[in-house]
């Protein structure tokens, strides 16, 4: 599959095809190339964050969501996705209460 290295939309599309084929690592390469071509390409940043999430690279995913948040200030969808995509540490359930004896 050939893509114009200077057309971020074509590069994102190539990454999307690879993601659909289950090749997240290869898709990341094309999303990064799209971001290098156009640093404000929100589609590339968003898909790169999702691909990193799929690869369990949570810190990298969060960095890309943070960049999106700078570009799309106070965008509800970006903020929601940032929270949903970043793993939340679960608080252990409370221990059962023990009876108090006088």
Image: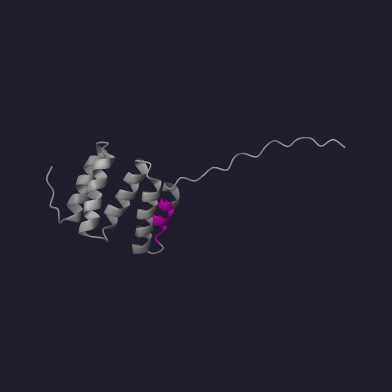
| Residue drawn where x is 11% and y is 45% of the image | 2
Total count of labels? 0
* Residue 34, image x, y percentages: 22, 54
| Residue drawn where x is 27% and y is 53% of the image | 44
Tell me: 45 left or right of 74. left
The reply to whether the magenta stretch includes residue 102 is no
Give the position of the N terminus as an image quadrant: top left
Residue in the foreground of this view, choosing between 81 and 70: 70
> In the picture shown, does residue 25 fall above or below 60?
above
Quarter of the view holding residue 54: top left
Quarter of the view holding residue 35: bottom left
* Residue 29, image x, y percentages: 23, 47
Q: How is the image coloured?
A: one colour
Residue in the foreground of this view, choosing between 3 and 63: 63
Most frequent secondary structure within the magenta stretch: helix
* Residue 43, image x, y percentages: 28, 54
| Residue drawn where x is 40% and y is 49% of the image | 59
Q: Which residues are magenta?
A: 75-82
* Residue 89, image x, y percentages: 52, 44
Tell me: 101 left or right of 16. right
Which residue is at the far right? Answer: 102
Give the position of the C terminus as an image quadrant: top right
Tell me: 101 left or right of 19. right
The reply to whether the magenta stretch includes residue 78 is yes
| Residue drawn where x is 49% and y is 46% of the image | 88
């Amino acid at each position: 599959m050939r893509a114009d290295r200077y057309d971020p939309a074509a590069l994102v599309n190539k990454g999307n095809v690879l993601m659909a084929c289950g090749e997240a690592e290869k898709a990341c390469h094309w999303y990064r190339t799209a971001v290098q071509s156009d640093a404000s390409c929100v589609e590339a940043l968003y898909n790169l964050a999702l691909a990193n999430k799929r690869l369990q690279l949570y810190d990298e995913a969060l960095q890309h969501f943070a960049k999106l948040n700078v570009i799309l200030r106070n965008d509800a969808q970006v903020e929601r996705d940032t929270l949903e995509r970043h793993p939340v540490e679960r608080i252990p359930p409370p221990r059962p209460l023990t009876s108090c004896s006088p």
